[in-house]
Amino acid sequence: MPGMTAYYVSRTLISAGFGGLLAATGATWWMAALTAGTVFLLFLWAPQSGRYAVHPELGVTALRRDERAQGITDKAARNAFVVVNGVVLALVLYYGRHEPAGVPVSALDLLLALGALTYFGADLWLRHASGAKD
Amino acid sequence: MILRNRIRDLRLQKTLTQQALAERVGVTRQTVIAVEHSKFAPSVRLALELARALEVSVHDAFWLEDEIGGTVQCPE
């Protein structure tokens, strides 16, 4: 994409930095390289994805959500917030009644995964529902 | 009330692609498609920008329709 040099250079540095951070914190070199490569591919895909309005004149911040994308993201985040808090409430009530010792840590991992799943699921569904199919 | 528009007709009259129109107003092609299909009601700002990009007034590009298909007149 023309005029996007600043964007691509900055994302290359971010991907390399992320890989370096992983390697420095104990990941194997191939895992760090694979992760950095994946992150860089996501950055390469983003301008073509149709999820962002591309403004090359803005340099490193060339990708912006337009008003429809922002509305979808806000709704997806709201859905995830409501679902996660509803499940937290249910867990607190359940464990408060049956196992007063507390909520197991593994339940919190599942809660994070549920939040992410709800967010991305709602995002995909809302994009599909609001039209852009051709 | 449903917000209708003739963005698609106006765009084709000016031989613009959806991508070209999207770039002119600073949104994604998906947003132009959603507006053309009346699946997304644009903000006043975006409606004005679309009308300006297509060189028409916003009244020529957008109107409100009631649920039995009648056009709602805008007060002058």
Image (spheres, coloured by chain):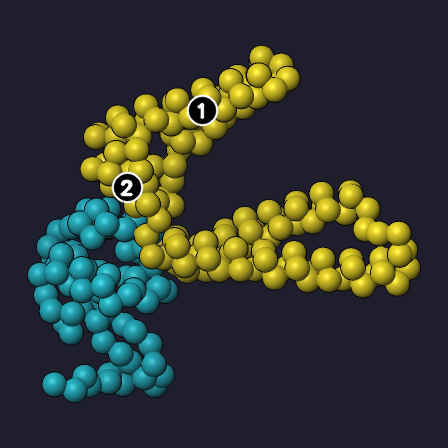
- The residue labelled by disc 1 is A15
- The numbered mark, 2 or 1, whose residue comes first in the sequence reads 1
- The number of discs equals 2
| Residue positioned 60% across, 47% down in the render | A116
Can residue A29 be spotted in the picture?
yes
Apparent side of residue B9 relative to residue B66 in the rendered image (left or right): left
Apparent side of residue A79 relative to residue A105 in the rendered image (left or right): left
- The residue labelled by disc 2 is A54
Distance, label 2 to label 1, CA atoms, is: 20 Å
Up/down of A101 relative to A26, above or below = below
Image location of residue B39, percent across then percent down: 36, 64
Up/down of A1 relative to A128, above or below = above
Q: Amino acid at mark 2?
A: Val
Image location of residue B46, percent across then percent down: 24, 61
Q: Farthest residue in the front direction? A: A101
Same chain assignment for discs 2 and 1: yes
Quadrant of the frame with the N terminus of chain A: top left
Q: Which chain is yellow?
A: A
Q: Callout 1: residue from which chain?
A: A
